[in-house]
Image: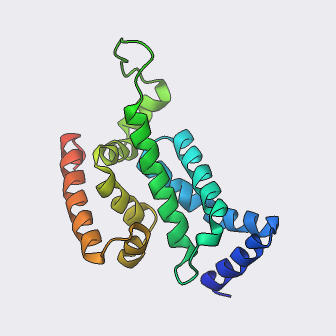
Amino acid sequence: MNSDRRDHALIDRCKRGDRRALEELIGHYEKPVFNAAYRILGNPDDAADASQVAFMKAFEHLDQYDPKYKFFSWIYRIAVNESINQRKRARNQQPLDDKEVTDVRGPEATAQAGDLSGKIQDGLMELKDDYRTVVVLRHFSDCSYRQISEILQIPEKTVKSRLYSARQLMKEALVARGVY
């Protein structure tokens, strides 16, 4: 059975209250959804929260899912939106006191920032949400241009344009960090 038919069968079972079908769908998409959220948010705890909320929203609104589209695209779209919204909420939060918080890194964070992966993640986090999202979906989630177009509900031309711009901005960020 191909993945689309399997997903549709599981969704039908979920709608009838089958918890095992729900667990199977989550098990299949949990890791890729988490990875996308992590690349957008840059923090594993925040990514776990965003992933959990995305799955909750998806299953609360399962009756709104249109089977002519892939479940993969639908759940990714919810996860991407939730991750972006979470980033926006975090930006709007104010510290409890007026003192500016300094960036004090522990040994693990310092080691990560020193390696290539940390520098790439730092550069990725500097991108605007629109750019970061297409990079994450293309390069970290291995989505095709068509899949990204479906997930983000934008034309493929726009996907390609954003991806090109995002790559240029990433290159500049990596050059600034002495990587490229």
Compared across the picture, whether 115 is left or right of 126 comes to right
**Residue 78 percent coordinates (x, y):** 51, 60
Residue at the image position 44 percent from the left and 47 percent from the top: 85
Compared across the picture, whether 42 is left or right of 178 comes to right
Compared across the picture, whether 44 is left or right of 10 comes to left
**Residue 28 percent coordinates (x, y):** 65, 67
Which of 38 and 171 lies nearest the eye of the viewer?
38
Which of 175 and 149 lies nearest the eye of the viewer?
149
**Residue 113 percent coordinates (x, y):** 38, 35
Q: Relative to 55, does residue 161 appear above or below in the rendering?
A: below
* Quarter of the rendering occupied by the N terminus: bottom right
**Residue 114 percent coordinates (x, y):** 36, 35
Residue at the image position 45 percent from the left and 16 percent from the top: 96
* Residue furthest bottom in the image: 1
Residue at the image position 27 percent from the left and 64 percent from the top: 163
Q: Quadrant of residue 60?
A: bottom right
Q: Relative to 129, does residue 14 appear above or below in the rendering?
A: below
